[in-house]
Image: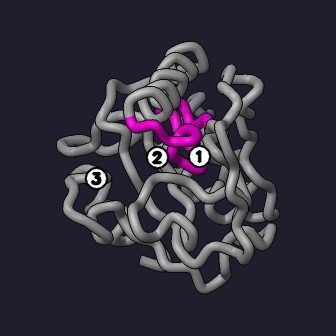
Amino acid sequence: MFTLVGLALLVAHVSQAFGACPTIVTRHEWGARAPRSVTHFSNPAHYAFIHHAESGDCHDRTSCTTLVKSFQNYHMDTHGWADIGYTFLIGGDGSVYEGRGWDVVGAHTQGYNSVGYGFCFIGNFMTKAPTALAIQAAKDIIACGVSNGKIQSAYVLRGHRDMGSTDCPGNVLYGLIKGWPHY
């Protein structure tokens, strides 16, 4: 007998094995503001960057949507960016939220935005790990990008801190990603 989490992980594993992409909560579905401008990628991304939001956790559509909207408002209103900085955001329930999305240059890793996508775990992972569902969702969205030609098959995975002076993606999450393929 499977628990709900166990069943969700099994479905994610089977989907990944057959090349299916995870379901993505679109910008329209989470109520995104229109971007001020858009710059497109010219080639598949070489990097996949892992971030954390240094925020509270979310474990359902309502709480994750609230946080994703707050990130977009902060990035646009406080930083003056064209849009939310991240390519995709991952909630604790394993939901994947479209940030800027595929083929769009983000504002997540200074000096590397035009050569990599930013995948942000919602929450603070300095002293704890993301949920198993969130970790699987991040792996699935990266695999989806590779299988659809959005990310190079020989991509390089890095934590935000590998590219600059920051604690992101948090000590525990950083320790985990160092064991993932392509790191």
Please determine whether, in this image, residue 46 is positioned above or below residue 175: below
> What segment carries the magenta color?
79-95
Task: Tell me whether circle 2 and circle 1 mark residues in contact (CB < 8 Å).
Answer: yes
Residue at label 1?
88
Residue located 70% across and 67% down the image: 41
Quadrant containing the N terminus in the rendered view: top right
Q: Is residue 46 left or right of residue 146?
A: left
Residue in front for this viewpoint, 74 or 182: 74
Residue at label 2?
120
Residue located 51% across and 56% down the image: 118
Magenta span has 86?
Answer: yes
Secondary structure beneath label 2: strand
Quadrant containing the C terminus in the rendered view: bottom left
Residue at label 3?
168
Task: Tell me whether circle 2 and circle 3 mark residues in contact (CB < 8 Å).
Answer: no
Secondary structure beneath label 3: loop
Secondary structure beneath label 1: strand
Closer to the chain start, of discs 3 and 1, is 1
Residue lying furthest bottom: 154
Q: Main secondary structure of the magenta part?
A: loop
What type is the residue that disc 3 sits on?
Cys
Question: In x, y percent, where is residue 25?
Answer: 71, 32
Q: CA distance from mark 2 to mark 1?
A: 6 Å
Residue located 49% across and 79% down the image: 156
Closer to the chain start, of discs 2 and 1, is 1
